[in-house]
């Protein structure tokens, strides 16, 4: 028997438009880790322009800044997440973790491993 698994995706929307999902969550996390929008984009395999576009779209829909950008000099610039962005990421992770647990429990009750 083939082992069934359940998968789900969750994202946040504003006025029916997606604003935060796995990809944009990863972008923000990588900006936080690298301190750079361009480094985050490289790690994701997307262009800086696309990353910048995602940031602008999210900020416009949410109504608050997500990234503080400091232009670089000789050593380069730096990008830091705002407190609001950090809270958004934390809450999104908690939401996803909670829903995944509930989905796993429901799946297990409907599709027990024995195949009953």
Image (spheres, rainbow, N blue to C red):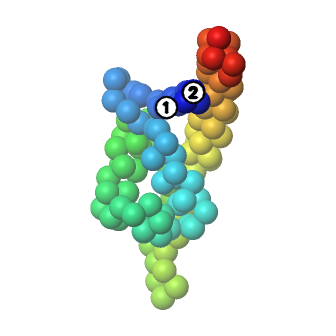
Residue lying at 52% horizontally and 51% vertically, measured from the top left: 26
Judged from the image, the secondary structure of the residue bearing numbered disc 2 is loop
Judged from the image, the secondary structure of the residue bearing numbered disc 1 is loop
Residue 6 percent across, percent down from the top left: 55, 27
Q: Which residue is mark 1?
A: 9
Crowding near pointer 2: few (<14 within 10 Å), some, many (20+)? few
The answer to whether residue 97 is left or right of residue 12 is: right
Q: Nearer the viewer, residue 70 or 39?
A: 39
Quadrant where the C terminus is found in the figure: top right
Quadrant where the N terminus is found in the figure: top right
Q: Which mark is residue 1?
A: 2
Do the CB atoms of the residues marked 2 and 1 lie less than 8 Å apart?
no
Residue 13 percent across, percent down from the top left: 41, 28
Q: Nearer the viewer, residue 4 or 36?
A: 4
Q: Nearer the viewer, residue 51 or 62?
A: 51
- Asked whether residue 63 is in view, the answer is no
Crowding near pointer 1: few (<14 within 10 Å), some, many (20+)? few
Closer to the eye: label 2 or 1 = 2
**C-alpha span from label 2 to label 1:** 26 Å
Residue lying at 49% horizontally and 31% vertically, measured from the top left: 9
Location of residue 114 (image quadrant)? top right
Residue lying at 37% horizontally and 57% vertically, measured from the top left: 51
Q: Which mark is residue 41?
A: none
- Total marks shown come to 2
Residue 57 percent across, percent down from the top left: 34, 44
Q: Sequence order check: which comes first, mark 2 or mark 1?
A: 2
- Asked whether residue 114 is in view, the answer is yes
């Amino acid at each position: 028997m083939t082992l069934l698994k359940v998968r789900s995706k969750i994202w946040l929307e504003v006025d029916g438009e997606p604003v935060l999902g796995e990809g944009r969550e990863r972008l923000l996390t990588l900006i936080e880790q690298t301190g750079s929008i361009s480094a985050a984009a490289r790690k994701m395999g997307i262009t800086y322009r696309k990353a910048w576009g995602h940031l602008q779209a999210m900020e416009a829909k949410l109504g608050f800044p997500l990234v503080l950008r400091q232009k670089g000099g000789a050593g380069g610039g730096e990008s830091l997440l705002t407190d609001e962005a950090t809270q958004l990421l934390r809450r999104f992770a908690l939401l996803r973790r909670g829903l995944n647990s509930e989905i796993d429990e429901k799946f297990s009750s409907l599709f027990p491993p024995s195949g009953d």
